[in-house]
Image (cartoon, rainbow, N blue to C red):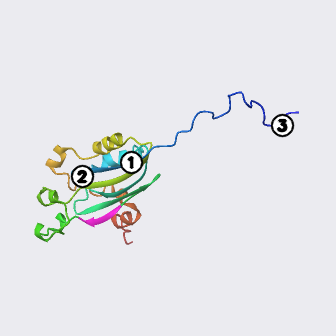
Amino acid sequence: GEEEGSEGEGSGEEEGSGEWVPPALSRFAFFARRPFHPARLHELLMCGRLDGVIRSRGCAWIADRQTESVTWSQVGNQMDLLPGEPWLAAKQLPVSQWPADMPGWTRAAPHGDRRTEVGMVGMDADPAAVRRALRRALVTRAELEQGVWGKHEGRYWWLLGASAMASANPATPQ
């Protein structure tokens, strides 16, 4: 008699007989000299529109955070946006006192060293589509010229994690 599980042997109709194609890994970066609009960044991240990005890390400039950078760290579905280092431009240090390794453009830029730089690792990701989605979340040039500082202050405190939530909403003494 035939052994169990021997049905279909040699028939060419085996399950999964298609050739396995390994996922394509990619490394790419996103760089911007305009800040993220808090509401548009929220919408982007809550809808999971960074398709294929499995890891990302860097610093971000969010419009309602003029004085400090935001540390961006994502692994899989876990995303952390936490308070980062103060921007040199916000410290009001003369440019001559900035570290020598700062890129040249930061010294002449109207907003100094404020920027977004995020490195990403993708699995079957479309880097161009990810960059387009991130660019759509930035403030527009017109919004930047009008000045977006403080207009969203406190509305998106959740972007900065639990420690920032506690400091943004201290318990009121009874």
Residue at (39% x, 45% y) in the render: 50
Closest to the observer: 17 or 79?
Answer: 17
Q: Quadrant of the C terminus?
A: bottom left
Q: Which residue is mark 2?
A: 35
The magenta stretch is 82-86
Closest to the observer: 19 or 116?
Answer: 19
Mark 2 residue type: Pro
For label 3, the SS is loop
Decide whether residue 55 is among the magenta residues. Answer: no
In the image, which disc is placed on residue 3? Answer: 3
Q: Marks 1/3: CA distance?
A: 53 Å
Asked if residue 156 is positioned above or below residue 135 in the image, the reply reads below
Q: Marks 2/1: CA distance?
A: 15 Å
Mark 1 residue type: Leu
Which mark is first along the chain, 2 or 3? 3
Please state which of the two labelled residues, at mark 1 or mark 3, is closer to the viewer. 3
Decide whether residue 83 is among the magenta residues. Answer: yes
Closest to the observer: 50 or 171?
Answer: 50
Relative horizontal placement of residue 2, taking residue 99 as reference (left or right): right
Residue at (17% x, 68% y) in the render: 100
How many marks are shown on the rendered structure? Answer: 3
Mark 3 residue type: Glu
